[in-house]
Amino acid sequence: MAYLLSTENFSKMSELVYRRSGILLQNEKHFEKLAKFIDARALTLGLDSFRKYFYKLRFDDNDESEFQELMNAITVNETYFYREKDQFEVLVNNVLPELDTNTKDLRPLRILSAPCSSGEEAYSIILHILEEGVVVEKRDIEVVGIDIDSTVIKKAIQGSFSERSVHAIPKNILAKWFKKRSLSYDIHENLRGTIDFKVANVFDKIQMRKLGKFDVIFSRNMMIYFDDESRKQVAMTFYDMLNPGGYVLLGHAEYMSRIVSVFNAKKIDTTLIYQK
Ligand SMILES: C[S@@+](CC[C@H](N)C(=O)[O-])C[C@H]1O[C@@H](n2cnc3c(N)ncnc32)[C@H](O)[C@@H]1O
């Protein structure tokens, strides 16, 4: 099967994807998926060569809708509720009580899930706060979820999840906060709309600045797709976005000490957290 994409042009595409999203594409892993995607887009757009598609993407995409199509096609959105659950426990048992004590004014504490994929991480934060957190009784907490992929953000806003996605939620909590439909579990109407979900790219400094300052940033299982230079950039963006004393939590396989040295690492049981 002949694709519009050639090996040489794959390098041009991967360079553009890397520069704009931090995501590293590898020929062996991603060529076929990308080639099929470009053929499908070219057909939809009435373009008959890679050169025309690439021109459209680079120079004729003012609203970035073509770039958005590309991002939606290449991102890996794997996620589920209560993934790496010990971090949510550390959030409600250690991090939030400490932040509550140390921030004297009664402003809301703000938590960012970046990336949130289809929302499971951000809702897991809310569910832990509601079910186990004492801080919530005295203080407003705001949760914001962002992802570069607009299809997952749409799903997050809809709040309708698959059996696989909810499999790790304890049965009593599932029964309390979800409505079982024939093919899905829908989040309770009292929770729908409590999280501010937005499409945003962590490399877009303007979008990041607009989100404001946070007390806690969850950034799990995204930087594994980046190289060291991109990880460093994102870590410093998060540093700037945190209030003094705020925390970053990374995925289990990710270590801030290998990225930047500006955070103080703390170990609570087996969980590492990083303080500004
Ligand atoms: C594997 S999911 C992780 C979701 C969740 N944090 C978790 O651990 O379950 C990775 C997400 O990172 C998002 N992503 C990749 N590059 C991004 C970028 N530059 N800005 C924002 N999100 C990005 C992808 O769209 C994808 O949904």
Image: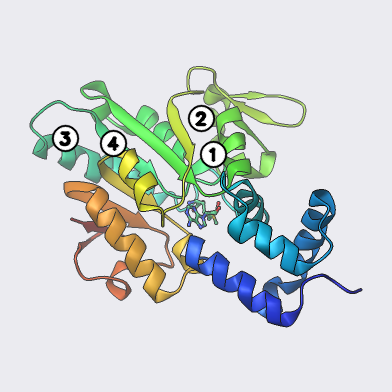
- Name the secondary structure under disc 1: loop
> Does the image show residue 269?
no
- The answer to whether marks 2 and 1 mark residues whose Cβ atoms lie closer than 8 Å is yes
Location of residue 156 (image quadrant): top right
**Residue drawn at the location 62% of the way across and 36% of the way down:** 155
Q: Which of marks 3 and 1 is in front?
A: 3
User: Marks 1 and 4, how far apart in space?
Assistant: 24 Å
Q: Earlier in the sequence, mark 4 or mark 2?
A: 4
Q: Left or right: where does residue 138 sit relative to residue 175?
A: left
Type of the residue with mark 3: Asp
Q: Which of marks 3 and 4 is in front?
A: 4
Spot occupied by residue 136 in the image (x, y as percentages of width and height) = 28, 26
Location of residue 14 (image quadrant): bottom right
User: Marks 3 and 1, how far apart in space?
Assistant: 27 Å
Q: Left or right: where does residue 141 sit relative to residue 73?
A: left
User: Marks 2 and 1, how far apart in space?
Assistant: 7 Å
Q: Which of marks 4 and 2 is in front?
A: 4
Q: Name the residue under label 3.
A: 100
- Asked whether mark 3 lies closer than 8 Å to ligand 1, one says no
